[in-house]
């Protein structure tokens, strides 16, 4: 690589010429139909250093799917700070359907049963430990998600699928988040609460706790307590028809090209269109790059943005710490393949993945970087050690071959010429 030609090309510790490699990379992915479009924002110490939108407007509204989860986690931790919830509280304190007597753990199929044809014929083990609020936020509660519909890794997912049960808006016939989580309590657990890590619908249950404790619906709580104070005016579960044109299509890879699958992934975001719009805390929001950057920057600054405090600094520190047993990484305590995580060196906090060992993670990010992503290949990370925030948006589902997060990391950090310049 050529060095940056002059000091004028360095901004907040980044070489702008090298950062512009993001533009070339994104353009090539779009040209070769690996991505339909992409938008990226890179910031350092609260200053936007670089941004580029390739084949999509900068103000596009993206379906962020599981990047909803950190918002729900923040909402619940606000109630913890207010003394209305404890992390060690039993979930059943707020949702009676989760009483231990109602729960059971999957203990294998009966000998001689045909797992492929009778997925509901399985052995049940009683719950021995209490499911807690902390376990909901760390995905250690034992719940699952139904993504592995054939049960190739998790037989429990196949049972979820048999019931038509997945993340909100669910395919089961429910009309509220409360009905949804009550139905979830009837599903088998993957493991005893607290005895493993399994990515799951636990954040939906956490969202219901927010509703029960606050007395507000999830959309109202998000808007009044988080979005309006942070100036996130274009983040919501649904939008008026007049804004529909700003929501770009969503695609899946198909025979070396891309196939538009927007219809079933768009109507639920538009107020005037038919379709279930039951808001969920795990995957229901849509947002812009700028709005989600404001949310991330609030977290990087320790819970405050522009004089508005959402959380206390120690609370954000607690959320961004690894909560897995004995300092384990995710893959030491989970049998599940999580595509967006490197094989080692990444733990999990209260709503985020957390880099605990950058060398094991093969990542240039600083230790303590916390992050998550969404099903349509959206990503964010917050690197407190280096003062860096990155938000990346596209709309590509079923992306199993293009490792966007590590590629993005390498491009961004190759341009960081002053890695010690982090400040609040």
Image (cartoon, grey):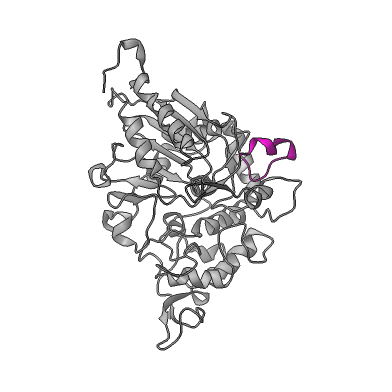
Residue 413, quarter of the rendered image: top left
Using the image as rendered, state which of residue 106 and residue 318 is in the foreground: 106
Q: In the displayed structure, would residue 87 be above or below residue 183?
A: above
Using the image as rendered, state which of residue 29 and residue 355 is in the foreground: 29
**Residue at position x 42%, y 47% in the image:** 352
**Residue at position x 60%, y 42% in the image:** 249
**Spot occupied by residue 311 in the image (x, y as percentages of width and height):** 48, 39
Q: On the picture, is 42 further left or further right than 334?
A: right
In the rendered image, the residue lying farthest to the right is 272
**Spot occupied by residue 194 in the image (x, y as percentages of width and height):** 38, 64
Residue 333, quarter of the rendered image: bottom left
Q: In the displayed structure, would residue 327 be above or below residue 47?
A: below
Residue 78 visible in the current orientation:
no
Using the image as rendered, state which of residue 105 and residue 229 is in the foreground: 105
Residue 1 visible in the current orientation:
yes
**Spot occupied by residue 37 in the image (x, y as percentages of width and height):** 52, 36
Tell me which segment is drawn in magenta: 236-248
């Amino acid at each position: 690589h050529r060095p940056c030609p002059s000091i004028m090309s360095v901004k907040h510790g980044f070489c702008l010429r090298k950062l512009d490699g993001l533009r070339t990379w994104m353009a090539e992915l779009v040209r070769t139909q690996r991505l339909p479009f992409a938008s990226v924002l890179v910031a350092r110490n609260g200053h936007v250093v670089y941004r580029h939108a390739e084949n999509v407007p900068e103000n596009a509204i993206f379906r962020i799917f599981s990047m909803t989860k950190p918002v729900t986690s923040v909402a619940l931790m606000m109630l913890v700070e207010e003394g209305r919830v404890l992390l060690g509280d039993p979930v059943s304190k707020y949702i009676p359907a989760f009483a231990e007597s109602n729960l059971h753990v999957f203990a294998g199929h009966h000998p001689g049963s045909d797992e492929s044809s009778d997925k509901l014929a399985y052995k049940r083990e009683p719950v021995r430990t209490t499911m807690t609020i902390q376990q909901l936020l760390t995905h250690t509660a034992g719940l699952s998600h139904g993504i592995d519909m054939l049960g190739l890794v998790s037989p429990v997912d196949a049972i979820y699928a048999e019931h038509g049960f997945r993340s909100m808006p669910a395919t089961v016939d429910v009309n509220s988040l409360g009905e949804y989580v009550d139905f979830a309590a009837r599903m088998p657990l993957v493991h005893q609460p607290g005895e493993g890590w399994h990515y799951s619908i636990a954040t939906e249950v956490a969202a219901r706790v927010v509703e029960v404790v606050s007395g507000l619906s999830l959309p109202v709580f998000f808007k009044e307590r988080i979005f309006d104070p942070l100036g996130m005016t274009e983040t919501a579960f649904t939008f008026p028809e007049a804004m529909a044109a700003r929501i770009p299509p969503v695609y899946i890879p198909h025979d070396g090209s891309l196939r538009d699958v927007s219809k079933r992934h768009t109507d639920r975001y538009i107020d005037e269109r038919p379709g279930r719009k039951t808001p969920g805390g795990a995957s229901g929001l849509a947002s812009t790059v700028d709005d989600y950057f404001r949310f991330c920057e609030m977290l990087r600054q320790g819970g405050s943005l522009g004089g508005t405090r959402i959380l206390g600094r120690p609370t954000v520190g607690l959320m961004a710490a690894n909560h897995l047993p004995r300092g384990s990484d995710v893959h030491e305590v989970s049998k599940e393949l999580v595509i967006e995580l490197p094989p080692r060196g990444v733990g999990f906090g209260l709503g985020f993945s957390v880099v605990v060992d950058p060398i094991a993670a093969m990542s240039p990010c600083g230790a303590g970087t916390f992050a998550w992503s969404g099903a349509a290949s959206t990503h964010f990370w917050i690197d407190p050690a280096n003062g860096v925030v990155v938000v990346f948006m596209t709309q590509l589902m079923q992306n199993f071959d293009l490792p966007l997060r590590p590629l993005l990391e390498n491009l961004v950090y190759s341009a960081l010429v002053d890695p010690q310049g982090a400040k609040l």
